[in-house]
Image (cartoon, rainbow, N blue to C red):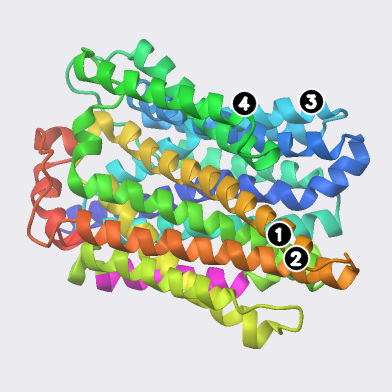
Amino acid sequence: MTQTSSTVAVASSRRWWTLTTVALAQLMVVLDATVVNIALPAAQADLGFSDGDRQWIITAYSLAFGSLLLLGGRLSDLIGRKRSFIIGLVGFAVASALGGAADSFGTLVAARALQGAFGALLAPTALAVLTTTFTIPKERARAFGVFGAIAGAGGAIGLLLGGVLTEAFDWRWNLYINVFIAVVAIIGAALFVTTLKRTGPRPKLDVPGTLLVSGALFSLVYGFSNAETDGWDSPLTWGFLAASGVLLVVFVLWQRRAAHPLLPLAIVLDRNRGAAYSSVLIAGAGMFGIFLFVTYYLQASLGYSPIQTGLSFLPMIGMLVLAAQLSTNIFVPRFGPKIMVPFGMLVAMSGMIYLTHLNLDSTYAADILPPLMIMGLGMGSIMPASMQTATLGVDRQFAGVASAMVNTSQQVGGSIGTALLNTLAATALTDFVAANLPTTPEVMADAAVHSYTTAYWWGAGFFAFGAVLSALLFRRRGQGLSLSHDPSASGGTAEMQDAPAPAMGH
């Protein structure tokens, strides 16, 4: 008995080291969406590129990342989690080193695109490793609590880290830092991530499906990025968005008849998983808006330094992590995602409404800290429950692509949210200035705050819609998942029988 219990203890501790490794990789990918933002002015001054070109440093990453996520998730299913994970880490580290050493705008953009491509392999693999490693419901809940907290807080941590590295060292360290994180994660992966034996014939890659969905996602992210810079009346914007719609329809039609579909439609059409993906998308849209406009407000309107801005978000991160742990360990098992996700959406909505009261005389403690804490509570209630539901009960052979759908939802949500909110804010600013001529510095300062307020109201609308949608879509407790595959393929009979009730409270 003693030997058995010690073996179980070693296996359990190995799982937690796996979680640490996976969390590091996830943090690195999520950080990179925001950490470079703060370094952009310094990079621009150093490399001498124009304001118009500046957005490509961000867009190159999000285009490659967003369009290749489903391929990355499927590759992790085909070539193995451990191998995909290590390849992703090594590639991401090399791309980061290349970006850090960039001596021209073109090199920096290429490095960012390469980061996005390897990030698209790394992010879904990290989540899939978690899905297949943690099969005991209680441990699974705890692991997803940590992972969900990182997914929600990574953007804010990126702002803080970006400020510290840019001010204390050099903008290049925003990229070099990934090399150090990746090296630690590679060692962790080599030691702790287990290789699962494949059962049955080796699955094949759905090449037409991959090309269709990658093209659709590229067009979608590019269309919204273009809307952000060139406006909604640009032919490029509508051209790419229309192309995305057509390609997605063709992709769905192809998946229905493909012998080896990239994304079996049953994964997405399950009500609970569909609810989880849409919740992550809406939360992503609202969340990116928060980081963007609160950062603008703190730096441009209140004159905060990059480090002060980053520190301002720390209490929000603390609240998010706390809420994620309470949610996964206490509230989700008790109430299920049908209660917790709409609750989180309503809390986040109230945080957004609170932010609409900010003005040029607002103080941090009284006016900025409370809504950020409320937002942290909301996101900590939404993300872990949604992520856990999104990957629950999926065949092990499709864990990678089901995980990739979570990242895709968050990425597409971020792209949509940033483009929509930026456009709405810009329109509000123009209208305010036109109504308050002559244009004095005071009018411009008020106009900026007015434009942020408009964005917060729309963000509140996103979360209100998310609350209604998730309340309607998530099943009540006791209603199981409709996609029930061979239990042995999904990590053990016990997982399939036990996971839905205790872990998620379906």
Q: Secondary structure at mark 3?
A: helix
Structural distance between the alpha carbons of marks 4 and 3: 25 Å
* Residue 309 within the segment the image draws in magenta: no
Most common secondary structure along the magenta stretch:
helix
Q: Is 202 or 174 nearer to us in this picture?
A: 174
Q: How many marks?
A: 4
Q: Are marks 1 and 2 in contact (CB under 8 Å)?
A: yes
Magenta stretch bounds:
314-331
Q: Which residue is mark 4?
A: 236
Q: Foreground mark, 2 or 4?
A: 2
Structural distance between the alpha carbons of marks 3 and 2: 44 Å
Quarter assignment of residue 238? top right
Amino acid on which disc 4 is placed:
Leu
Amino acid on which disc 2 is placed:
Ala
Q: Is residue 307 visible?
A: no
Q: Residue at x 77, y 31 (%)?
A: 108
